[in-house]
Amino acid sequence: MVLSGTVAVAMKAASSPDGEARETYTRVGALSLYARQWAAPNRRPSIVLVHGLASNSRLWDGAAEALARRGYHVVAVDQRGHGRSDKPDDGYDMATVATDLAGLITGLGLERPVVAGQSWGGNVVVELALRRPDLVRGVCGVDGGTIQLRDRYADWESCARTLAPPDLAGTSSAKFESMIRSAYRGWPVAAVRGTLANMEVLDDGTIRPWLTFERHMRVLRSLWDHRPLDSLSSLSRPLLLTPASATEPIASSQRESFARVASQSPNVRVHWFAPAHHDVHAQYPDRWAEVLDANITGGFLA
């Protein structure tokens, strides 16, 4: 174990059916954050991958392996309340989760990594870049980063009713796996396994979400309160947005919306995936990794 101030890092090798990864537990204050690492730090920038709401680090496995094959050191983290990380009852506001991520970067000794986040995780990495631009060289929002729920719903109550998670606790693990394999037919094996890892399998063979309903709603409320577009013009680090459209061609309203976002700052670039799922990084890990790599080697995220 290596101690650095209030941050402790413990690491062990862990074999995975999706490739060789190292499991890492990093203590940030009173919080222990679980992460998986591929390859080792080198001359290329490290890449930190941040999951979305009610997800987990394993959904990045395919993209992480694709990036590691391209020579990058990659870290995929479980955010607080999720996966194998600690699950306090509080601290789910955007400022705190961004501070968690800053602590992870510092604790692992990463030198200005590129940080990518999906959905809610995209908003988290944008908040990180706004608060601690010294820690990152650039960030990427994967169908996220510019989410403003207040623009979509008249009030918090209607947002909460619409976006509250389904009650899956008590479902048999076999039934849940069948549901996921059917819904994600044709997806990479790593994506299916990563989705299944959103749930804890209990001794009786049933599942429950790693993220409890109460904590889920606290995260959702923080996303409701978050308005990243109000601060985008002050962003000093490059932001790559990789939105997903369910249809091709992409609706003109969607294109115009992201064009307006990009016009706010020369530090913003947009690359569309269409047709694609909200979890585009899991659906098309190699394609997404190729886009991120091109924006690093091409100098935008350098």
Image (cartoon, rainbow, N blue to C red):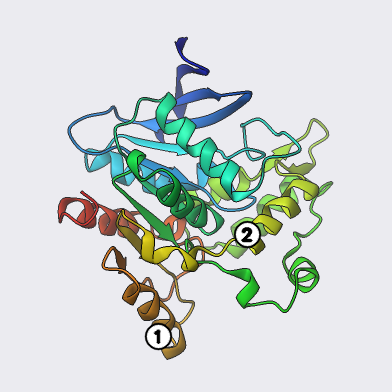
Quadrant hosting residue 165: bottom right
What residue is disc 2 on?
A: 223
Which residue occupies 59% across, 41% down?
96
Residue at 37% from the left image edge and 66% from the top image edge: 233
Badge 2 element: helix
What kind of residue is marked 1?
Glu
Tell me: residue 191, above or below residue 269: above
Which is more toward the observer, 60 or 262? 262
Q: Residues within 10 Å of mark 2 (few under 14, many from 20)?
A: many
Q: Is residue 20 visible?
A: no
Horizontal placement of 170 versus 84: left or right? right
Classify mark 1: helix, strand or loop: helix
Q: Is residue 7 above or below residue 281?
A: above
Q: Give residue 203's position: percent from left, percent from top.
A: 80, 30
* Left or right side of 263 for 247: right
- Quadrant of the rendered structure where residue 79 is? top right
Q: Which three-letter amino acid code belongs to the residue tagged 2?
A: Leu
Q: Position of residue 109 (x, y in %)?
A: 35, 25
Residue 175 spot, x, y in % from top left: 74, 52
Q: Residue furthest front?
A: 234
Tell me the residue at 71%/38% (across/down). 200
Q: Nearer the viewer, residue 17 or 296?
A: 296
Circle 1 Cα neighbour tier, 10 Å, few/some/many (<14 / 14–19 / ≥20): few
Q: CA distance from mark 2 to mark 1?
A: 23 Å
- Whether residue 45 is situated above or below residue 140 in the rendered picture: above
Q: Which residue is mark 1?
A: 256
